[in-house]
Amino acid sequence: MRKIAVTTAALLLFSAILAGCGSSLIKEEKNSEAAQSDIITVGFSQLGAESDWRNTNTASMQEALTPENGFNLVYKNGQQKQANQITAVRMFIQQEVDYIVLAPATETGWESVLTEARDADIPVILVDRRVDVADKSLYSCWVGSDFELESKKMTAWLKAFTERRNISPENLHIVNIQGTPGSTAQIGRTRGLANAARENGWDLMAEVSGDFTENKGREVMAALLKGYDNINVVYCENDNMAIGAIDALESAGKHIGQNIMNGDVMVVSFDGVNEKSREYCREGKISCIAECNPLHGPRVQALIEALENGETPEKFNYVDEGLFSSVSSVKKVVVDGTEYTIQEP
Ligand code: GYE
């Protein structure tokens, strides 16, 4: 669509010059028309605004896909509902956008609408989470984090911590406050913990979803405290839920820290995006944060530019991430042969 528009504008300009009626005004108009039509229209279906990570991610996209950079960004917030996202994608198809960028809430149920996008010849770029489709050609590429690796780093930290303190594995009584069920981030972070608990002999007592929001994190933590009186580790699948959980723990009179054999409850989480969670991490209220990088805007921009140049970008594009902690006993962890030095929050 855009290419036809560019060609038409170029032809118009060319015939205007040929006809000799090239007053500077006309030329300027034609130039700006050509520049206009060179703009790449991107429909971005963001899944929601549930967390600080998400808002930072949205801002990153909006800052990269600007008119100055050659883009017209059509942003749609799915309010954490896949049905809204499917409607948004259909709208983008109708609008004949040049690219669709999709940050899917959950993994399943995307075949039909992605097939519609392919039938309309609109490339789809996935950002952050993934879709579970048999036919991988339904999307051009994906950029995001390795969520299971994040979890492996976190559980390696937890293991190193308990070893330094001579805490035996069966004395870890863990609850997992999970993210949105069926989302890639939840699946990877839950799997990593479940595997580590099995391998190390930790007592993983409960897995309950807090939907990645602070309010649900607070609610779920309060409910867990009623059901279990020996929780000493709270594994939160994002910082916002950790902030809510810490609130609930403190309201219930719990002390949060690392002295878990003497009544403390230790909180660990994921993201490291907002100042409050970093502050909590500096204070030791959150003992460790596995970083999750939301700054995908420039990455998506580079992927679109590569596609525009006729290149075939890597199908799966991972970002590098680290671990934050101010607990001095653990300096580094090794996961799958790679060493990660713990960073100051
Ligand atoms: O960790 C969480 C957000 O999918 C990586 O979603 C993302 C997660 C992120 O709501 O805070």
Image (cartoon, rainbow, N blue to C red):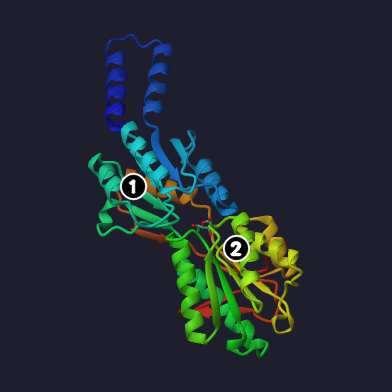
Query: 341 above or below 213?
Result: below
Percent across and percent down for residue 191 are 45, 72
Which quarter shows the N terminus? top left
The residue at the point 33 percent across, 8 percent down is 21
Query: 232 above or below 145?
Result: below
Query: 160 above or below 36?
Result: below
Q: Nearer the viewer, mark 1 or mark 2?
A: 2
Percent across and percent down for residue 25 are 43, 12
The residue at the point 70 percent across, 76 percent down is 327
| Closer to the camera in the image, 340 or 131 | 131
Tag 1: Cα neighbours inside 10 Å, few (<14), some, or many (≥20)?
Answer: many
- Asked whether the beta carbons under mark 1 and mark 2 sit within 8 Å of each other, the answer is no
Amino acid type indicated by mark 2: Val
What residue sits right under mark 1 in the picture? 124
Q: Residue furthest left?
A: 119
- Ligand 1 within 8 Å of disc 1? The answer is no
What residue sits right under mark 2 in the picture? 220
Residue 324 visible to the viewer: no
The answer to which image quadrant residue 318 occupies is: bottom left
Q: Residue furthest front?
A: 226
Left-right relation of 285 to 116: right
Left-right relation of 121 to 153: left
Amino acid type indicated by mark 1: Val
Sequence-earlier tag: 1 or 2: 1
Residue 320 visible to the viewer: yes
- Ligand 1 within 8 Å of disc 2? The answer is no
Give SS at disc 1: strand
The residue at the point 74 percent across, 63 percent down is 251
Give SS at disc 2: helix
Percent across and percent down for residue 267 are 65, 70
| Closer to the camera in the image, 13 or 104 | 104
